[in-house]
Image (cartoon, helix red, strand yellow):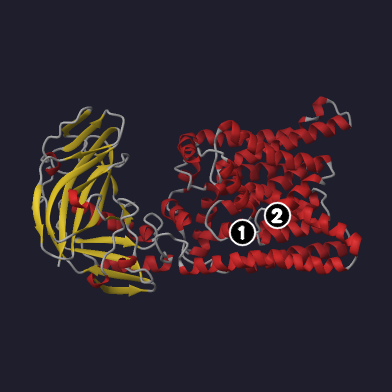
Amino acid sequence: MSQTSLKKELWIILSLIAFSIALRLPTLESPLIEDEAISFNRYIDIPWQDLILNYHDTNQHTFFLLFSKFSIWIFGESEIAFRLPSFLAGVLSIPLIYKLGLQIKVPWPTALTSALLMSVSWPHLKYSLEGRGYALTIFLVTLATYSAIKYLNTFRLVWGSILIASGVAMTMALPSNLFFLCGLGVFIILTEYLEAKKIKLSIKSIPKGFTQLFIMLSLIGVYFLTIYEGLKLGKQFNNQALTWDKIENITEFIAAPWGFWIYLFFALGLWQLQLTREKILFLSVLLVPIFLTLVTGVVGFDRTYIYWLPFVLLLSASGITYIFLWVFKKIGKFTYVLGLIFILLLFNFSNKKITKHYEDRSNGSLVVAGPNATLSEASQLAIWVEENIPEDNLIVLSTGGPESSVLIRYMGEKTMEHMIYFARGGELKKLIFISHQGMPPENYSFTPWTPDQMLRLPASRFNKIYSLGNLGVYELNLQVKRFIPSRFDPDYELKLGTSEMPQVNIQKVEEPRVVGKHALFIENKSGVPMDIISPVIKGTDIWGAETYLLYLFIKSAQQKGGVHLGDNKNWPPTLGFLNPWLGRFRTSSSSYHDWHIKFSLSSLSKGRHYFQERIGIQKGISYFDGFQSYLLTE
């Protein structure tokens, strides 16, 4: 390549990088949202070796988390540091797709157009700004394909090594990326076979390219065997049906923000592929994953198939440049005007969606339950809470989602200590809510019993006692007193009366238990969920207009179902669970057992009420312990 060409290439790559950075810097420091916040809460403190050797659930994007932990170790704990691997992968994948286009011998305008399309692609930009493994997937898919082609061209060890490393990293980012790697492997095998046949090489010469593929798949196999138990659990989340609606959702996701019409150019680009190697590449990476999906029945979320994005954009760019070259032959230089209009149209689609996305990220509306706190606010407020909130105050984290609130990262342990204190009989005096000031407790959506009955607390009952940045600490201005039982009774769950139900076995057991001398054992042999209603009825008059029932019980962590002090005239209750994703702990008196403390708050109307404990059970064995309730009154 001449000196002039090198300078041109350098300017193009630098310009693409600068443009990509400019689009991806805004809101990079905004509060964490939904899944990325869940990943942060669950995994950022897990040791490196545990991340590598265990796969806990589908939110564990191991390769991203390893890089993110390293970034936080270098730069400190912040949103930018956590998201930095996604940001860098997003930026670098854009000049990389340009280089990939040139490597597979598409025209220079096609390679450049594909890079520009990727720079404003909705899924690419979205995941470049989020702390997840999807931006890394796009980068690694592009790098693996580029290194595979370079290796087939040169058989240089460096490209074979990059192919192996990028392939293994890809499956550590998302195990489902194995389907793409199988497609890439088919491309390598077919290409080597056809080229060997073309030049009449002996069969002994063919395995040159197979060696790297074999090493890569062997390493992935070892990794998958290591995390096999976690993969079995993850498969339960990826067993959706591959319906036409699902296919439509996947194709729409990849084509965003432009919509299905971009596939007209995609089809044209696929049709006019000239070289045999190009055809094998695109058909392999597109069709083999589809075949494996159909055979295995493993159908993931729409975003799982983001590994197709570079190839859809390359073929779409090929179709676009083919049309414009054809038009140029017909009408000459006026084509440049049409081209400019078309580019502006493409960017206009992107601009609207990107601008709206920036706004949503800034104001927190992407979080279903309300805006999240920043890591800095949460860590600073945790110090204040530690110093100022006594043990007899129940802390309620009502910022962000029930599991995605970053307050869990900094205050979860403190909140948990208080929850266990009350579960073991400690006296409760106050409820303290920690909320985003843009969505104070009276506006927060607490996890309901049923979706159509949301608990709403009156603003008049909250006193703001402290604020820091966007966070506020609110005291619920109601008196708290024990209700049923009127004094702490660690074995109260055994005094609910006998409910004779066929195929249901109810016993008291000494182990496992949390409080008192026994716990409640229930075995449901009917095979269907059901409610057990206590025959003991407690009649009570509620005098206050603003009265609430705070209910507490402990259940086995693995089981579904729950308990509530029910009133027939108000069933199902207008109820909100407090700290629903906290409260998990382990006892080890004679054997380890995992438990979950559940707190719920429900409104009570004025007048006479007749209460009965209602225990919801699933099929199989359930354990319950520590039933308590409180009245919150004016």
Q: Is residue 514 visible?
A: no
Q: Which residue is mark 2?
A: 262
User: Would you identify the image quadrant in which residue 600 lies?
Assistant: bottom left
Q: Where in the figure is residue 295, as x and y percent of width and height?
A: 59, 31
Residue at x-position 74% and y-position 37%: 187
Can residue 336 be seen?
yes
Q: Which residue is mark 1?
A: 122
Position of residue 375 relative to residue 596, above or below, is below
Q: In which quadrant of the rendered image does the C terminus lie?
A: bottom left
Q: Position of residue 394 (x, y in %)?
A: 23, 60
Label 2: how many Cα within 10 Å (few below 14, some 14–19, many 20+): many
- Which quadrant does the N terminus fall into? bottom right
Asked if residue 111 lies left or right of residue 185, the reply is right
Label 2 element class = helix
Give the total number of marks visible in the rendering: 2
* Secondary structure at numbered mark 1: helix
449 to the left or right of 275: left
Residue shown at 46%/60% (left/top)?
A: 33
**Residue at horizontal 55%, vertical 51%?**
133
Given the image, on which type of amino acid does mark 2 rest? Ile
Query: Mark 2 or mark 1, which is nearer the start of the sequence?
Result: 1
